[in-house]
Amino acid sequence: MTFNNNETRQSILTSLFALAASIFFIPLFITRGAGPLDFWWWMSASLMVLITAGAVLDRDYRDGLRGDLAENPARKIGLGLAAALALYILFGVGNIASRYLFDFAGRNIDAVYGFRGGASPLRITLLMAIVIGPGEELFWRAFLQRRLSRHLGRWAGFAAATALYTAVHLASGNLMLVLAAMVCGIFWGLLYFRFRSPLINMVSHTVWDIAVFIVFPFSA
């Protein structure tokens, strides 16, 4: 098969990245690690591979990231912090409501914190701050959602990226984690849809991750 149409080639490349994300992350949520790689190392390594490949293969992606970081970063950091706070409050309300309404909610929420495993809080925090928080937004929104929106249209691209982000969490078998991923996917997808700023998303995701898992968790 030969490709003489750049749009077709780019669409196939986007599909291959979506497939690669599924291959990386679905087993991660099933096994929570393999060999020397626990959940946090596996997540970090997978994101690094996907982001690096995306930067090598997509010049617009590289140029867009440089431009975003150079344009009014202080304002974007402030918006990212505000978005993290808003999402944390939303989850705080959801935590109280779900534990009150559903018997299984408390067990599911507590099980999410089991992903910490034997990893030290310091290592989790550092990986979240340096790789995982920024990396998830660099891949899922700045790379994948942007490309899907280019091929499918803005709303369809947003919906497709959010659906895939939610779907890989199904492998965990934890309904509350899946619902949390869906809410986060919609929230950060809309945030990117509105501002088109990877930096805003990276700050929001990173600060929210550290708050929820380390500083102010919803479980003991």
Image (tube, rainbow, N blue to C red):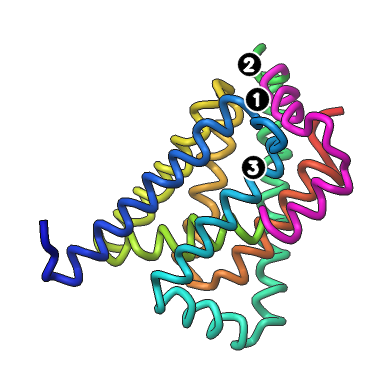
On screen, residue 74 versus residue 141, left or right, reads right
Mark number, residue 98: 1
Measure the C-alpha gap from mark 2 to mark 1.
6 Å
User: Residue 80 at what x, y percent from top left?
Assistant: 67, 66
Expressed as whole percent of the image width and height from the top left, the position of residue 131 reads 68, 58
- Element marked by disc 3: helix
Residue occupying image coordinates x 47% and y 63% = 53
Residue drawn at 52 percent across, 39 percent down = 25
Q: Do the residues bearing badges 2 and 1 touch, measured as CB atoms within 8 Å?
A: yes
Side (left or right) of 117 relative to 52: right
User: How many C-alpha atoms fall within 10 Å of the one at disc 1: few (<14), some, or many (≥20)?
Assistant: some
Tell me whether the residue at label 2 lies in contact with that at label 3, contact meaning CB atoms closer than 8 angstroms: no
x and y percent of residue 181 in the render? Answer: 55, 39
Identity of the amino acid at label 2? Phe
Q: Marks 2/3: CA distance? A: 32 Å
**Which callout, 2 or 3, points to the residue nearer the camera?**
3
Screen quadrant of the N terminus = bottom left
Q: Nearer the viewer, residue 27 or 189?
A: 27
Q: Amino acid at mark 3?
A: Trp
The quadrant of the rendering that contains the C terminus is: top right
